[in-house]
Amino acid sequence: MFVDALGSGLYLPLTLVFIHEVTGLSATSVGLAVTVAAAAGLAANPLAGILIDRFGSRSILIGTYLLRALGFALYPLVGSFPALIAVAALIAVGDRAYYPATSSYTAAIASGADRDRLYAYVAMARNVGFGLGGLLSTAALSVIGDHGFVVMAVVNAASFVGAAGCLAFAGPRLHTELKQNGAAPRQQHGGYRAILSDRPFLSLVGAEQAFTLVHSVLPVALPVYVVVVLGAPPAVLGVLYTLNTLLLVVGQLPVRKLQARARRTHALALGGAVFAASCGAYAAVAYLPEGGWQLAGLVAATLVYTAGELMHTAPSSALAAVIAPPAVRRRYLAVYQLTWAVSGILAPAGFSALLDVATPLLWIVLGFLLVIACVMVLRLSGRLPAAAVFPQSATATALQATTA
């Protein structure tokens, strides 16, 4: 996860600029191609669930790395709009299939409270990688200039190959655990039809859609809000991004320890409440005096927002993994991860439109959605198995089974 994120961190903060500079195509063409590719990537989530059931999460995860390595290696060769769509769609398919694959893989090699802890470690490793990758991209552009974008494409392709190698040559103990905990059963019944009839899970997916939309605030809404709406200098974004990244790195494990004995549903709802508070804080910044007061308000709102991110990550991933029946877990996680793909399509246009109508409208809508999501999650607490709600319950059950 760290090697993957290190390479991805090179280009993610400058995605559209990166593609424009590498391909030489217009910004309009790049934006349209990325949107079309994101729509094409939607189909990869449910397809990934089927492929994971058939070939295993580790194999599909390695495949997503190699697919994206090929895509980034091809970026410098793109010279036309159709070619850009083809390469961007290839990468989008790999991106979308990656999330259910990595979630399934993590769920297969850990259980109970250990699974929550592993999700926290994964999030920490990825945030460290993204942060370092962003610093390296800045250094590359400063030293090499515009040629640095091509170097970034090649290095990111190499990082995906390296990440695939890390999984391919992992130790035998890891593979033994994966075989015992994560092997897909030969006979499966229901597939995606079973998911459509699972109302508690669909309620969880609906709540998660609100949470994932809010996760798009920092990369999508904040640049427009800070620079266009508030008129603050772009350098403010660098301060907020750095603060967010550092806190995500150092705070993930301490927050996970605080959540260790809490109900996953309650921990998730509390994270949603903190997210909602951050929306209120961001909305209030518009009414502060310009300059230092607004900067202080943005920093405070980002601190609250980051706390919501920290509180949401581990219980959300673990809850989805445990609630899913083992026979169709991969397809459940594929549907669960589809919320990120939907957010990737809705957020850019939706957030901009709401900010254009009225400054506080975006934050009001997001806060309203989060309140509904929190209520939905709390209502699920009594409808889900104890092993799904309580991390320690799952661990105790596993230990009793081992002793017996």
Image: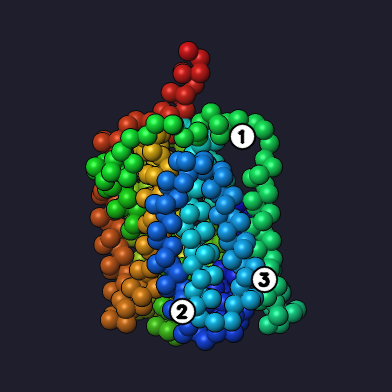
Identify the residue at the far right of this view. Answer: 143
Which amino acid does the dot numbered 3 rest on? Met
Label 3 sits on a secondary structure element that is: helix
Label 2 sits on a secondary structure element that is: helix
Question: Residue at the location (41% across, 34% down)?
Answer: 326
- Report, in whole angstroms, how far the alpha carbon at label 1 lies from the one at label 3: 32 Å
Image position, residue 178 (x, y; %):
56, 34
> Residue 293 is drawn in which quadrant?
bottom left
Which amino acid does the dot numbered 1 rest on? His
Give the crowd class for mark 3: few <14, some 14-19, many >=20 residues within 10 Å.
many
Question: Residue at the location (56% across, 43% down)?
Answer: 58
Image position, residue 386 (x, y; %):
34, 30
Query: Number of numbered discs present?
Result: 3
Tell me if 170 is positioned left or right of 261 in this view.
Answer: right
- Report, in whole angstroms, how far the alpha carbon at label 2 lies from the one at label 1: 41 Å
Determine which residue is flagged by label 3.
Answer: 152
Image position, residue 157 (x, y; %):
65, 63
Q: Is residue 52 above or below residue 21?
A: above
Determine which residue is flagged by label 1.
Answer: 175
Does residue 388 appear anywhere in the picture?
A: no
Does residue 346 appear anywhere in the picture?
A: yes
Image position, residue 145 (x, y; %):
71, 82
> Residue 35 is drawn in which quadrant?
bottom left
For marks 1 and 3 on the same chain, the one whose residue lies earlier in the sequence: 3
Question: Residue at the location (49% across, 67% down)?
Answer: 89
Determine which residue is flagged by label 2.
Answer: 31
For marks 2 and 3 on the same chain, the one whose residue lies earlier in the sequence: 2
